């Protein structure tokens, strides 16, 4: 069977699609799996296991052609030649993970007998199949209600079964050796914890202030020996410089712009912990088995794109405006996470204990703290690290997980009941609500449901 996966997205989205590639191997043994990615992220895609043929979509060349006047006839002609060259025969199955018109158009143009995900139809309308793909598209307009991680949405819209095995990448031995030699040259003491810091993010409002990174790292350094590695793109080097300036000389290595994807993965694999914003490198760290302590600000939301796997810790501000949908001139969330709390959580993670901060958070504005976990059916879950009163927001997120899970998946294997598991989570991880989170008319409808 000839299977094509289309993923025309960025670093993090590529890493989050690795369970799709793994499950294709398990559920369609002996098939040839091709992967189409943006040419800008070809190096990242080379880290993904389970790919027989990697194709770089020529987006840069097409963009250059379209900048000319008139450039579209030349671009269309070139794209037609590219498709003919690489796909002389139609694939048997196309899985389009790209929720854009470009991804849907490419899926339609290749014309496989079966297409999963988004595609154009003969009337040039966008259509989605199977039902999980439709859910994924619809819920993007109601993100606050979505209980499912992007990794599980990728799997289910591809028609595949979650296995709870997390993300994965492959680092070649030469690159791993390069990172190993660079670390050995630092001549660190055996008890030194190697901690990564990722102060950048895709948008400025998603960035925890670099001064806060520095303060948390400094507090951590006072409690145990550490060496800090600052990562990021070349454009994020100024953020890294601010962090480094707040730390003692000799305790930090600045690497922004110096780690292509393979080398970055090799470094991350050797770390004891990564403290990060919601970024692509966060997912890469999870893929190489490094614990992450992530700060989710602005539009970042843990249920959507939290680090996949068990044991990761995620912080969100407890603000009514989070997650936001519009740019904010003075993001309150950037000051809602304290360096003290991050340092305490990081210390517990490094020492292998239960990652719990010292004492209960106080007040309504205390951060939400989540622990990465997996449900009995292999779906990613994020459970409160500390029991707190059940809010209406929490209740409806878990209710959506129950109702949509049963509606879209049907009966669970072995007769297991999703509702029983959700109820157990609410009982074990939350305190009784201070007031009924469900209006009476809603409660009546839920009973009928």
Image (cartoon, rainbow, N blue to C red):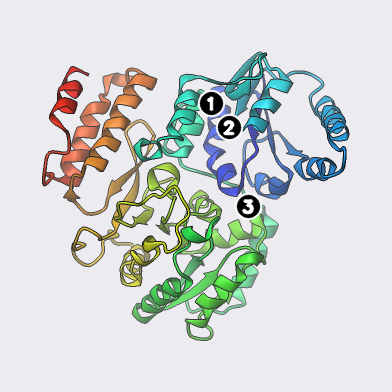
Left or right: residue 443 compared with residue 213: left
Of 101 and 257, the residue lying toward us: 101
Whether tag 2 and tag 3 are in contact, CB under 8 A, the answer is no
**For the residue carrying disc 3, how many other residues have a C-alpha within 10 Å: few (<14), some (14-19), or many (20+)?**
some
Whether residues under marks 1 and 2 lie with C-beta atoms below 8 angstroms apart, the answer is yes
| Circle 2: element type | loop
Q: Secondary structure at mark 1?
A: loop
Q: Position of residue 337 (x, y in %)?
A: 34, 64
Q: Nearer the viewer, residue 10 or 26?
A: 10
Q: Secondary structure at mark 3?
A: loop
Q: Residue at x 43, y 57 (%)?
A: 291
The quarter of the picture where residue 220 lies is bottom left
Residue situated furthest bottom in the rendering: 249
Give the mark toward the camera: 1 or 3. Answer: 1
* Residue drawn at (54%, 33%) of the image: 20
Marks 1 and 2, the one that precedes in the sequence = 2
Q: Which residue is mark 2?
A: 97
Residue 285 position in % (x across, y down): 51, 55
Q: Is residue 301 above or below residue 35?
A: below
Q: Is residue 234 left or right of residue 143?
A: right
Image quadrant occupied by the N terminus: top right
C-alpha distance separating marks 1 and 3: 26 Å
Residue 5 in sight in this render: no
Tell me the tag on residue 171.
Answer: 3
Identify residue for label 1. 158
The image's mark for residue 309 is none
Going from the N terminus, do you reach mark 1 or mark 3 first? 1
Picture layout, residue 41 above or below residue 290: above
Q: Residues within 10 Å of mark 1 (few under 14, many from 20)?
A: many
């Amino acid at each position: 069977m000839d299977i094509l996966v289309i993923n025309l997205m960025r670093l993090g989205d590529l890493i989050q699609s690795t369970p799709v590639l793994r499950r294709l191997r398990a559920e369609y043994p002996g098939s040839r799996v091709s992967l189409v990615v943006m040419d800008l992220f070809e190096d990242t895609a080379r880290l993904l296991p389970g790919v027989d043929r990697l194709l770089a979509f020529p987006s840069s060349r097409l963009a250059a052609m379209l900048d000319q006047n008139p450039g579209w006839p030349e671009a269309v002609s070139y794209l037609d030649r590219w498709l003919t060259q690489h796909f002389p025969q139609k694939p048997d199955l196309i899985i389009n993970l790209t929720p854009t018109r470009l991804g849907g158009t490419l899926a339609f143009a290749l014309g496989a007998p079966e297409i999963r995900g988004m595609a154009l139809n003969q009337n040039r309308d966008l259509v989605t199949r199977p039902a999980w793909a439709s859910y994924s598209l619809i819920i993007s307009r109601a993100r606050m209600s979505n209980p499912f991680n992007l990794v599980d949405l990728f799997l289910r819209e591809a028609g595949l079964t979650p296995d709870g095995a997390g993300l994965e990448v492959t680092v070649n031995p030469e690159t791993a050796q390069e990172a190993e030699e660079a670390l050995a040259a630092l001549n660190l003491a055996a008890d030194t914890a190697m901690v990564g810091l990722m102060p950048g993010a895709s948008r400025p409002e998603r960035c925890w202030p670099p001064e806060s990174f520095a303060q948390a790292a400094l507090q951590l350094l006072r409690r145990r020996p550490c060496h800090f590695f600052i990562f990021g793109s070349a454009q994020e080097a100024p953020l890294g410089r601010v962090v480094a300036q707040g730390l003692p000389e000799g305790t930090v290595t600045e690497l922004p712009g110096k780690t292509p994807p393979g080398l970055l993965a090799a470094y991350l694999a050797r770390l004891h912990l990564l403290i990060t914003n919601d970024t692509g490198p966060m997912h890469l760290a999870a893929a190489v088995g490094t614990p992450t302590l992530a700060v989710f600000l602005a539009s970042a939301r843990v249920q959507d794109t939290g680090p996949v796997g068990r044991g990761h810790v995620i912080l969100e501000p407890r603000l009514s405006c989070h997650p936001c949908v519009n740019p904010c001139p003075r993001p309150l969330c950037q000051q809602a996470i304290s360096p003290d709390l991050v340092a305490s959580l990081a210390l517990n993670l490094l020492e292998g204990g239960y990652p719990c901060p010292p004492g209960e958070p106080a007040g309504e504005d205390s951060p939400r703290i989540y622990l990465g976990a997996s449900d009995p059916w292999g779906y990613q879950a994020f459970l409160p690290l500390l029991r707190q009163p059940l809010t209406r927001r929490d209740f409806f997120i878990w209710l959506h997980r129950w109702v949509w899970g049963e509606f879209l998946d049907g009966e669970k294997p072995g007769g297991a009941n999703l509702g029983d598991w959700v109820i157990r989570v609410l009982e074990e991880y939350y305190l009784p609500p201070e007031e009924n989170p469900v209006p009476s008319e809603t409660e009546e409808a839920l009973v009928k449901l």
